[in-house]
Image (tube, grey):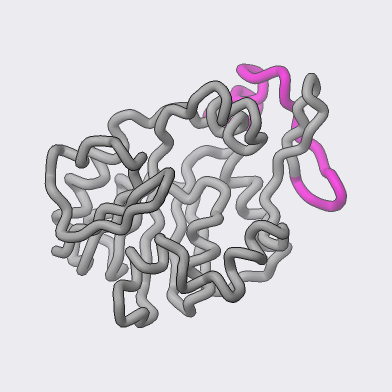
Amino acid sequence: MDLDLLLSANPEYQIELFDRQLSLFHKKDKHHVFVDFNSKQLKFRSQAHLNAELIIKAVLGKKKQTTSIMDCTAGFGKDSYLMSLTGSKIIAYENNPLMYALLKDGLNRAEIDNISLRKIDALREVKITNCEVIYIDPMYPATKKSAKNNKQMMFLQAFVGHQSEMAEELFIQAKQSAAKKIVIKRPVKAAFVLDKKPTSQIIGKAARFDVYAL
């Protein structure tokens, strides 16, 4: 689906430049959605708190050695950004044309050189990736309250939607790759993907990371 079709299906949004940033403007709620790697939230998470991030613990393990990571579901790029701060090389995949455009603009403005963004379905390349770690974080349904109060979640629900079978499909392909491990982000109380018990887990209040050693 191209940009015009996506926008025509969601007429409450329009694409525009906002403070020199490519953004989607919500006409009713009067808010802009864009990618900003210089936000206060990301700065807080990426400085003294980086090694405390659950995703860093799950992806790098106890030794915290840099690695190469395939982010199959890049979205707004926050996870890719945090992982890139460890010095690891990230190949981020985002197939949605609007999300790709916003993320590409954000990466260009931030001048991040160890994240390579690709506009392609990760399912086409996950089995043949040369990355040591495969990271999967598909969209799952948000509560009405969380979606209403989170501008980025509202955007994702409107333009990306719930990817009910993506985790399963990516997991099946990822297990056939030469990667050393697969990390899947899940809601805390969600079932294991394909009922496959992980090798280890990193569990937080709202989400958990299931780690599968290959």
Question: x, y (%) of residue 128?
Answer: 24, 59
Where residue 29 sits, quadrant-wise, is top right
Q: Position of residue 181 (x, y in %)?
A: 22, 64
User: Relative to 144, is 141 on the left or the right?
Assistant: left
Asked if residue 117 is among those painted magenta in the image, a careful observer would answer no
Is residue 14 in the magenta section?
yes
Q: Position of residue 108 (x, y in %)?
A: 68, 62
Residue drawn at x 53%, y 28% as measured from the top left: 157
Instruction: Pick the residue in front: 63 or 161.
Output: 63
User: In the image, what residue occupies the spot 43% across and 27% down?
Assistant: 141
Quadrant where the C terminus is found in the figure: bottom left
Residue stretch in magenta: 1-22
Q: Could you tell me residue 163's position as x and y percent?
A: 38, 31
| Count of marks placed on residues | 0
Residue ID at (41%, 61%): 54
157 versus 56 height, above or below: above
Q: Quadrant of residue 25?
A: top right
Q: Is 97 placed left or right of 192 in the picture?
A: right
Residue most toward the right?
A: 19
Q: Nearer the viewer, residue 93 or 26?
A: 26
Q: Nearer the viewer, residue 167 or 120?
A: 167
Decide: is 40 above or below 10. Answer: below
Q: Is residue 123 above or below residue 69?
A: above
- Which residue is drawn at the image coordinates 61% and 70% (left, top)? 112
